[in-house]
Image (tube, grey):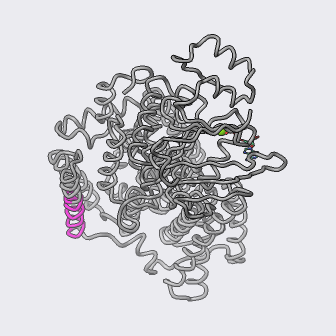
Amino acid sequence: MSVATHESGSPAQTTEPVLELTGIGKHFGAVQALAGVDFRVHPGEVVALVGDNGAGKSTLVKIMSGVYQADSGRMRVEGREVHVHSPSAAQSLGIATVFQDLALCDNLDVVGNLFLGSELGSNAWMDEVAMEKESWRLLRELGAKIPTVRIPVASLSGGQRQTVAIARSLVGSPKVVMLDEPTAALGVAQTAEVLNLVERLREQNLGVVLISHNMADVQAVADRIVVLRLGRNEAEFRTVDVTTEQLVAAITGASDNVVAERHARRVPPATETGEVEA
Amino acid sequence: MSTTRTAPTDETAARADLIDERLAQDTGLRGAADAFRRRVRDGDLGLLPVVVGLFVIGLVFYLQDVTYLSSSNLVNITLNAVPYGIIAVGVVLVLLLGEIDLSVGSISGLAGSITAVLVVQQGQPLVLGLLAGAGTGAVIGIAYGLIFTKIGVPSFVITLAGLLGFVGLQYVVLGDTGTINLPRTSPLAQFAREDFLSPAVSYVAVVVVVVAYALVSIIGIRRRTAAGLPAQSLTLVLGKSAIMLAGLGFLTYYLNIDRGWGFAVVFFVALVVVLDLVLRKTTWGRHLYAVGGNVEAARRSGINVNWIYISAFSLTGLLAATGGLMFLARLTSVSQASGSNDVNLTAIAAAVIGGVSLFGGRGSAYSALLGVLVLTAINSGLNRIGVDSSVRYIVTGAVLLLAVSIDAIARRARASSGRG
Ligand SMILES: Nc1ncnc2c1ncn2[C@@H]1O[C@H](COP(=O)(O)OP(=O)(O)O)[C@@H](O)[C@H]1O
Ligand SMILES: [Mg+2]
């Protein structure tokens, strides 16, 4: 399938991209994980990044978050060319990442986790009152339901932990938030809650990058869907223009794919809620 | 929150509220007691087992020998606990990181030897000798930290090598003298043996400590209330302060019947209090817990993980050396046997018995204080009964196993009540 780009109309796209990558290449030994990949996200836009296992999604996210450095290509934040050589460099550029493993400290409470590495206070002395107050503000902003911020995060449910991880990414007032499979380990209601959080992030005019294997989630919240396949841009769709079969076909790289066909036969296009777990 | 995987909202909220005594604002003392009961049932035992253990030990030995709980014996226990306790405080730091220092005994022996050689044999000023001894420990700790972070050797192996190596170095430092005696008139020996707070000073100190505690708590309540956050009730703070005043006051009265609070004991307790504040209130302390809990998460948060390891190892070395200087002061001598396995294992066991998790991220500075009191109290009791030192080792081992078992059972209870 050739690269299909359906550009137009969305209000977000009339603005300058907050984060833009062009011609990104990255190899690990003999494996070309990414080759000439372009990617951009605008303020107030949710971009879903989908693709089969090994397509290069996590590698791309890690390049944007400073965990890996690209071999080739350019990266711009608000039009300015940048070099992101460490996670903290990405953070100071306003790029926040919620990693798939959440990276929470189970032994610390919610406040401790939210402000880990950017504690409030004077010099070495922490201002617990200010941090606790700010924690409640952040959680309220996300409409999060957490009964107390003073219990170790180990005792929170999966959805609550995800909420804490997302709230934590907001501490430095970022411009872009990237979420790597935020709903993979969650139940139905908790998934709905996390998707609500994603909507909240968009309302705050942040650029949001969402990695997911779940087509229903992607189609529910994303404005634009970028499909990677074998380390290359395979396709790009506006969510309103695309059917699940088209997505599945782009992901698997074949329009005559059995999965896509069976899907098309079973589910009428209007009500589809497909899921591709590769 | 959700209906699929968690309990309904109301129940979750109510239970979570009770988890934290600071949230039991409008229920006062009874609310605090309820929260405490609930915590214990859910396996969050904190320092409870050690405190209970101390009472049991006191009772058992008292029944054997009524003079066990006499003022003079309690003063001796406090004095004997100090050197081990200071070393144990350092052990707490590395254990919080999920690492270990097996060489604290060797470091203590080496530091004592260096100070003794400089001061007694070479007639150098005492301050210089102390700085050299303590500095040696800090430098060893920095070296451990560098080897650990830059080369990646497990702390178990690095410090096992140190355990052996520094015993050898201690022999070299002591030369063929064998034993060096510190004059009892030396200010160092006086500090650990003869210097005690006068009764008047000790009572004033108790009042100052309790008033400071109450004031800080009340200021905390004010700030939290002003910020619209739940705060503990004034009654609770006043109740705690009253209990503290009564407890410390009685203890002071009882110890004052004999010699009272030794300077060294006050030094040790102050060290524990300061370290507890550093661990709970500073970013360095927070980062130490974070690294012990999830080092990868700490690294991705931008924490300088290597600095945390190196600083903690060096503090552990410094405290081990300081403990060694206290042994020199208390025993007024140093020999090839100083800082032997007994010291090593007692200090590490004390931290663990006090409730510091071996897996990192859990425990407090007070663990060292309580753990070392348990072991010193047992030691004193067994000595008074006149049992062989073989029995002492066996009992110490059994207590260590018991303490770790209690922790393991409590951890299971925590897991099943969702408190990790
Ligand atoms: N650290 C690494 N070392 C070697 N190969 C890697 C590494 N990270 C990713 N890869 C390879 O790069 C490709 C893309 O991986 P990844 O970005 O994790 O895919 P995705 O997240 O889309 O499933 C895969 O072939 C994977 O094996
Ligand atoms: Mg991945």
Would you say A96 lies left or right of A36 here? left
Between residues A131 and A218, which one lies in front from this camera angle? Answer: A218
Q: Is residue B86 above or below residue B241?
A: below
Would you say A13 lies left or right of B25 here? right
Quadrant in which residue B233 is drawn: top left
The stretch in magenta equals: B200-215
Q: Is residue B180 visible?
A: yes
Q: Position of residue A218 (x, y in %)?
A: 54, 31
- At a point 40% along the width and 36% down the height, the residue shown is B44
- At a point 47% along the width and 35% down the height, the residue shown is B420
Quadrant occupied by the C terminus of chain A = top right
| B261 part of magenta stretch | no
Between residues B174 and A226, which one lies in front from this camera angle? Answer: A226
Decide whether the magenta segment is chiefly helix, strand or loop: helix
Between residues A110 and A233, which one lies in front from this camera angle? Answer: A233
Q: Is residue A44 above or below residue A237?
A: below
Would you say B93 lies left or right of B110 here? left
Quadrant occupied by the N terminus of chain A = top right
- At a point 51% along the width and 28% down the height, the residue shown is A186
| Quadrant in which ligand 1 is drawn | top right
